[in-house]
Amino acid sequence: MTLHHLMLFLHVCGVVVWVGGMAFAWFCLRPAAMQLPPDRRLGLWAAVLRAFFPMVWISIALIVVSGFGMLIETGFARAPLAWHVMLLTGMVMIGVFASIWFGPWRSMQQAVANEDWARAAVAMNTIRQRVGFNLGLGLLTTAIATLGLAF
Ligand code: HEM
C-alpha cells in the first residue's frame, strides 16, 4: 500500500459518507418523514441533521486534505483536467454546504427550539433544495472522478 492508496481510501470514505448520507436523506428518509405531522417531522429532521452535519464537516476535511495531497503529489501542472474539474465542483459543493450550515440550518434550529413550525418548515425547504443540488453535483463529481470528462 502506498501513501497515494491511503489518501485515495480516505478521500473515497469521505465521499461515501457525504454523498451516501444525502442520498439516504433524499430518497429514504424524506418520503417516510412526509407521513408525520409537521411538528414531529421537523423535530425528526432537526435531530437527524444535528447528527449528520458534523459528519459532513469531517468528510469535507478528509476529502480536501487527501484531494490536495494527491494533487500535490502528482503536481498541478501534470494532473489531468478531470482532477481540476473535480477540485472546482468539490469546492462548489463545500460552499453550498457552508451556506446551509450558516444560513437555514441556524434558523431551523432556532425555530424548532421555539416551536415555530412555520419558520422551521421554510428553513427545511431551503435545506432540502440545497441538499438536492449537492447530491446531483456529488454524483456528477463522482462521474468526473471515475469516468473522466468523456462520459
Ligand atoms: C475538494 C476538492 C477535491 C480534490 C482536490 C480532489 C482530488 C482528487 C484526486 C487528486 C484524486 C485521485 C485520482 C486518481 O488517483 O485517479 C481523486 C479521486 C477521487 N475523487 Fe476527488 N477531489 C476533490 C473532491 C471530490 C469530491 C467532492 C468527490 C465526490 C463527491 C470526489 C470523488 C472522487 C472519487 C470517487 C475519486 C476516485 C477516482 C478513482 O480512483 O477512479 N472528489 N480526487
Image: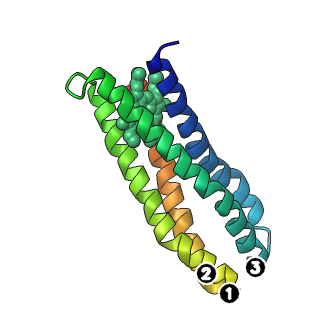
Tell me if mark 3 has few (under 14), some (14-19) or many (20+) residues whose alpha carbon lies within 10 angstroms of its own: some
Q: x, y percentage for residue 148?
A: 36, 26
Relative height, residue 74 to residue 128 (above, below):
above
In three-dimensional space, the C-alpha distance between marks 2 and 3, rounded to whole angstroms, equals 14 Å
Q: Which mark is residue 39?
A: 3
Residue found at x 44% / y 47%: 137
Total numbered badges shown on the rendered structure: 3
Q: Nearer the viewer, mark 1 or mark 3?
A: 1
Percent x, y of residue 107: 55, 78
Is tag 1's residue or tag 3's residue first in the polypeptide sequence?
3
Secondary structure state at the residue bearing disc 1:
loop
Question: Which residue is identified by label 1?
Answer: 114
Residue at image location 72% in from the left, 52% down from the top: 28
Q: Residue furthest front?
A: 3
* SS at badge 2: helix
Task: Determine which residue is flagged by label 2.
Answer: 110
Q: Is residue 143 visible?
A: no
Picture quarter containing residue 141?
A: top left
Q: Nearer the viewer, residue 4 or 130?
A: 4
- Give the residue type at disc 2: Gln
Would you say residue 42 is visible in this rendering? yes
**Badge 1 density bin: few <14, some 14–19, many ≥20, Cα 10 Å:** few
Task: Name the mark nearer the viewer: 2 or 3.
Answer: 2
Amino acid type shown at disc 1: Asn
Q: Nearer the viewer, residue 14 or 130?
A: 14
